[in-house]
Image (cartoon, rainbow, N blue to C red):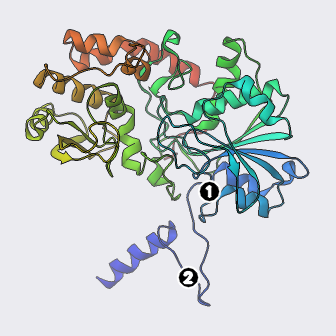
């Protein structure tokens, strides 16, 4: 037994999953399987020496030792002069859709400037006093998560301002193998979907930057940036974030855990309905429901579907903000039991379909003030909404985008930078 425990402890220490101490009592450096683009840059910061750096980041720009990228760059003598933030702000404090403010950082004295809500031509003047732009933000692997579009707009603005643009690459936390869901129809483009990529794109931010720069920006008549992607070391396409050994920092207030990121490509669609997607709870996008739902009834119906890699339990909650704030809500909690088999888009559509079937008089699609359907923006067309309204089974709807997925996979193959794990 002691020998077995010793072997387990040795493995844990080898892969850096807990802190270690040397014989003299000093804490050793955290060991990871993956070195991010940030830490590759910090190993050789000379290319940025003497240049005024504009840094686009948020709390996820962090080293494996829990030091924020801004502090680490300044410590290496990199002259960061301006810091820019995406949706939720540089500090990551604002809720979805809120416009973060700009202010002076009390610690460094640097200006923290909001980019969210600004078009590329509005960003150009914000980049006048820097020599190079550097982007380091953790994405979550879903098309309607907005950080990748802040990156795209900033790349376009950098090109207009004649400034180089550097992306410090980070893992796709839900893996780089699976590519799932519908591809966005350009007629439905918005800031939750600018370019024709699938709902689950299976690319890193660095790979997306290359795709945007060489294909989509030119297609819309925008200039391409002078782009450099600093690659990670050790990341493989089949890695989930938990495989990297890197610490997880919530990328936004309602993306607290890795489990949230796994379900988000599918349960994010719940935002397009009158169900609560769990905002205002501690498990957003995993807790789903509405006051009219009987939790046991929906859970039983969903479990009968035997969806791959996932189960459901009846759940009740009272959101502290957002939809159904202060009301007792019945619904389900989503449990991903096998991430490799789990299909988030099939799961999300099935939740919507079963809710609509069980509660046809209460279920509604969410409409904006201009009467547009939010679900159409999230899914990139009116196809999912109209097919669900027709009663088309979710698995049949899934087959409707096979050809566009095949075409996208062919396109994205030109921009992939990381191989699968070698056996």
Query: Upstream in the sequence, badge 2 or badge 1?
Result: 2
Q: Secondary structure at mark 1?
A: loop
Q: Looking at the image, which residue sits at the far bottom?
A: 24
At x 43% / y 14%, what residue is drawn? 370
Specify few, some or many for label 2: CA neighbours under 10 Å numbering under 14, 14-19, or 20 or more: few
Report whether 7 appears left or right of 124.
left
Number of numbered discs overlaid on the protein picture: 2
Q: Which residue is mark 2?
A: 21
Q: Position of residue 401 (x, y in %)?
A: 39, 14
Left or right: 33 in relation to 78: left
Q: Nearer the viewer, residue 412 or 138?
A: 138
- Classify 373 as above or below 63: above
Compared with residue 58, is residue 66 higher up or lower down, i.e. above or below?
Answer: below
Quarter holding residue 372: top left
Q: For residue 291, which quarter of the picture?
A: top left
Q: Which residue is mark 1?
A: 62
Q: Which mark is residue 316?
A: none
- How far is mark 2 from mark 1, CA to CA? 22 Å
Q: Is residue 92 visible?
A: yes
Q: Is residue 349 left or right of residue 42?
A: left
Near mark 1 (Cα within 10 A), the count class, few <14, some 14-19 or many ≥20, is many
Q: Residue at x 11, y 25 (%)?
A: 358
View extreme (right): residue: 50
- In which quadrant will I find the N terminus? bottom left
**Viewer-nearest of labels 2 and 1?**
1
Residue at point 53%, 20% (across, down): 190
Vertical comparison of 256 with 133: above or below: below
């Amino acid at each position: 037994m002691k020998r077995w425990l010793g072997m387990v402890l040795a493995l844990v220490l080898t892969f850096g999953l807990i802190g270690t101490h040397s014989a003299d009592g000093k804490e050793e450096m955290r060991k990871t399987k993956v070195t991010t683009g940030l830490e590759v840059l910090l190993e050789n910061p000379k290319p940025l020496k003497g240049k005024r750096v504009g840094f686009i980041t948020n709390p996820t720009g962090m080293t494996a030792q829990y030091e924020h990228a801004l502090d680490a760059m300044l410590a290496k003598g990199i002259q960061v002069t301006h810091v820019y933030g995406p949706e939720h702000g540089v500090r990551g404090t604002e809720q979805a859709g809120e416009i973060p403010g700009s202010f002076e950082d009390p610690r460094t004295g640097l200006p923290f400037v909001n980019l969210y809500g600004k078009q590329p031509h509005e960003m150009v003047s914000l980049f006048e006093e820097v020599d190079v732009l550097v982007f380091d933000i953790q994405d979550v692997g879903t098309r309607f998560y907005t950080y990748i579009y802040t990156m795209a707009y900033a790349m376009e603005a950098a090109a207009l301002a004649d400034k180089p643009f550097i992306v410090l690459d980070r893992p796709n936390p839900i893996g780089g193998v699976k590519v799932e869901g519908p591809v966005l129809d350009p007629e439905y483009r918005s800031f939750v979907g600018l370019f024709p990529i699938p709902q689950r794109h299976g690319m890193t931010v660095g790979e997306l930057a290359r795709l945007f720069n060489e294909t989509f920006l030119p297609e819309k008549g925008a200039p391409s940036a002078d782009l450099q992607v600093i690659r990670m070391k050790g990341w493989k396409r089949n890695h989930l974030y938990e495989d990297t050994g890197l610490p997880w920092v919530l990328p936004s207030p309602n993306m607290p855990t890795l489990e949230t990121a796994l379900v988000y490509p599918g349960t994010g669609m719940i935002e397009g309905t009158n169900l609560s997607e769990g905002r205002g709870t501690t498990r957003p996008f995993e807790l789903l429901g509405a006051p009219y739902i009987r939790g046991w009834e929906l859970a039983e119906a969903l479990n009968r579907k035997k969806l791959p890699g996932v189960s459901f339990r009846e759940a009740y909650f009272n959101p502290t903000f957002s939809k159904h704030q202060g009301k007792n809500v019945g619904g389900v909690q989503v449990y991903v039991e096998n991430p490799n088999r789990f299909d988030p888009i099939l799961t999300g559509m099935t939740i919507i379909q079963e809710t609509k079937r069980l509660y046809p008089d209460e279920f509604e699609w969410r409409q904006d003030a201009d009467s547009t359907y939010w679900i159409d923006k999230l899914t990139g067309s009116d196809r999912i909404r109209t097919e669900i309204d027709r009663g088309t089974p979710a698995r049949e709807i899934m087959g409707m985008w096979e050809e566009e997925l095949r075409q996208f996979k062919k396109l994205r193959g030109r921009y992939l930078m990381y191989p699968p794990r070698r056996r």
